[in-house]
Image: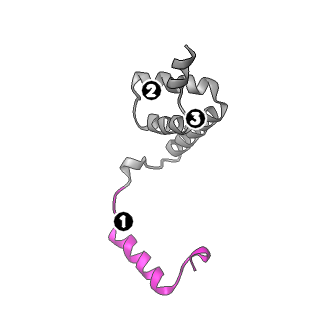
């Protein structure tokens, strides 16, 4: 039993990857079970899961677009504003 448990437990790195993936799609049953077992044992990953939920709720509340709905390119007017600022040297302090 112990040997199987050691092989089937997830690392925190893998658990956080799965938690992030679960925000986007439903995980397969075996991954959900492994993640659930890890979360029962790891308070830090439970905290990470709570933080992800909070961020997702805040994004929905404030109407921020989901990652897959953000356009891939800037509008022409946005590009022109950026060019103008770069020409004028209007850069944030940390980029000077």
Q: Is residue 81 magenta?
A: yes
Comparing labels 1 and 3, the label whose residue is closer to the camera: 3
**Residue 67 locus on image (x, y percent):** 41, 49
Res 28 label? none
Residue at mark 3: 49
Task: Answer with left or right where residue 34 lies relative to residue 27.
Answer: right
Res 74 label? 1
Q: Is residue 72 magenta?
A: yes
Q: Give the mark nearest the N terminus, 1 or 2.
A: 2
Residue numbers of the magenta segment: 71-96
Q: Give the mark nearest the N terminus, 3 or 2.
A: 2
Task: Answer with left or right where residue 84 lies relative to residue 48.
Answer: left
Q: Is 76 located above or below residue 34 in the figure?
A: below
Q: Mark 1 and mark 3 in contact? Answer it, CB < 8 Å.
A: no
Task: Name which residue lies at 56% across and 43% down.
Answer: 55
**Inter-mark Cα distance, 1 to 2:** 37 Å
- Which quadrant would the C terminus be assigned to in this image? bottom right
Comparing labels 3 and 2, the label whose residue is closer to the camera: 2
Residue located farthest toward the right when viewing the structure as drawn: 43
Residue at mark 2: 31
The local secondary structure at tag 1 comes to loop
How many numbered marks have been drawn onto this rendered protein structure?
3
**Residue 65 locus on image (x, y percent):** 43, 49
Within 10 Å of disc 2 (Cα), the crowding (few <14, some 14-19, many 20+) is some
Task: Name which residue lies at 42% across and 22% down.
Answer: 30
The local secondary structure at tag 2 comes to helix
**Inter-mark Cα distance, 3 to 2:** 15 Å
Residue located farthest toward the front when viewing the structure as drawn: 3
């Amino acid at each position: 039993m112990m040997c199987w448990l050691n092989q089937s437990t997830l690392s925190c790195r893998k658990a956080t990857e799965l938690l992030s993936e679960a925000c986007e799609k439903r995980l397969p049953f075996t991954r959900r079970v492994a993640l659930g077992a890890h979360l029962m044992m790891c308070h830090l990953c439970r905290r990470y899961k709570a933080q992800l939920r909070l961020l997702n709720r805040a994004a929905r509340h404030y109407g921020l677009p989901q990652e897959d709905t953000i356009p891939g390119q800037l509008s022409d007017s946005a590009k022109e504003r950026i060019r103008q600022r770069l020409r004028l040297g209007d850069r944030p302090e940390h980029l000077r």
